[in-house]
Amino acid sequence: MFSGLIEIFQDPRAFFLGVLIVLPGYLIGLTLHEYGHAYFANKSGDDTAYLMGRLSFNPLKHIDWIGLVCLFLAGIGWAKPVMINPSRVGRNTSRSRRWWFISIAVAGIIVNLIVAFVLFFGWAIVCKFLPATAFVSRGFFLADNIIYAAIRINLALAFFNLLPVPPLDGYRFVSTCLRRPPFALQQIERYGIFIVWALALTGALGTYLNFFAGGTYTLMGKLAQLVGLM
């Protein structure tokens, strides 16, 4: 935690180079995550997100600048949440309102996983056909680092949001699946953000993400080897 803030003073050049490498991954991951929520909300019959301009691939429509800065300085950040009108969800559709609420909740997570897989295997295919001389160029080195960072960021965003802690998507998924959420689950809504920070400060969040996001990355590598891409 706060390693970014420390690095600014210790090695400003390395810090800002790191920002340039990971920024595309954050912009892609956060933008498509929120777009996924907006897309399914709009498909459900609720045009609130559409009217607010959130059904867009423009990062400026989704990025919260304070949240983005916190990502670099503290390791935890956020984007602008996609607003929905519950009374409009599921109207004039053949699917149940409950199905739509679940779909809206998990849309961002699924999008981040898809982005990670597409980037990983797409880059593996590109590298498979590159001439040997390309691998020692500065352009390849920079592109490889940016894509690697984007893959890991999207995996981290997916598994981070999978946590059943408010205001994260995992909590919305669990509370929607349970027709009558337990009283204790309802009460933690007011303390959700404190729980997230506690997980981060104790290192539990990092351990969790290393296990699941890191494990998924390793699994993708083994799959790529299996099909002859690595």
Image (spheres, rainbow, N blue to C red):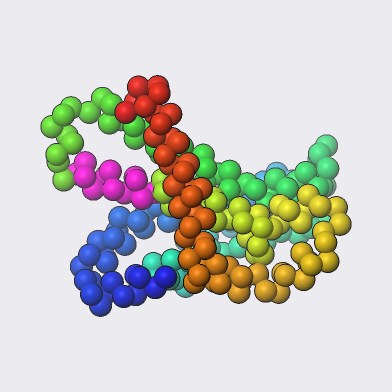
Compared with residue 223, is residue 4 higher up or lower down, i.e. above or below? below
At a point 62% along the width and 56% down the height, the residue shown is 163
Q: Is residue 16 magenta?
A: no
Q: Is residue 129 visible?
A: yes
At a point 45% along the width and 36% down the height, the residue shown is 219
Residue 61, how many percent across, how many down?
A: 52, 60
Residue 37, how many percent across, how many down?
A: 63, 51
At a point 34% along the width and 75% down the height, the residue shown is 5
Q: Residue reaching furthest top?
A: 227
Magenta segment boundaries in residue numbering: 139-150
Q: Quadrant of residue 50?
A: bottom right
Q: Is residue 144 magenta?
A: yes
Left or right: residue 2 versus residue 87 is: left
Compared with residue 194, is residue 17 higher up or lower down, i.e. above or below? above
Residue 9, how many percent across, how many down?
A: 25, 77
Q: Is residue 50 visible?
A: no
At a point 42% along the width and 56% down the height, the residue shown is 26
Left or right: residue 197 versus residue 71 is: right
User: 163 or 130, which is in the foreground?
Assistant: 163
Quadrant of the drawing holding the C terminus? top left
Compared with residue 84, is residue 102 higher up or lower down, i.e. above or below? above
Residue 225, how many percent across, how many down?
A: 37, 27
User: 61 or 155, which is in the foreground?
Assistant: 155
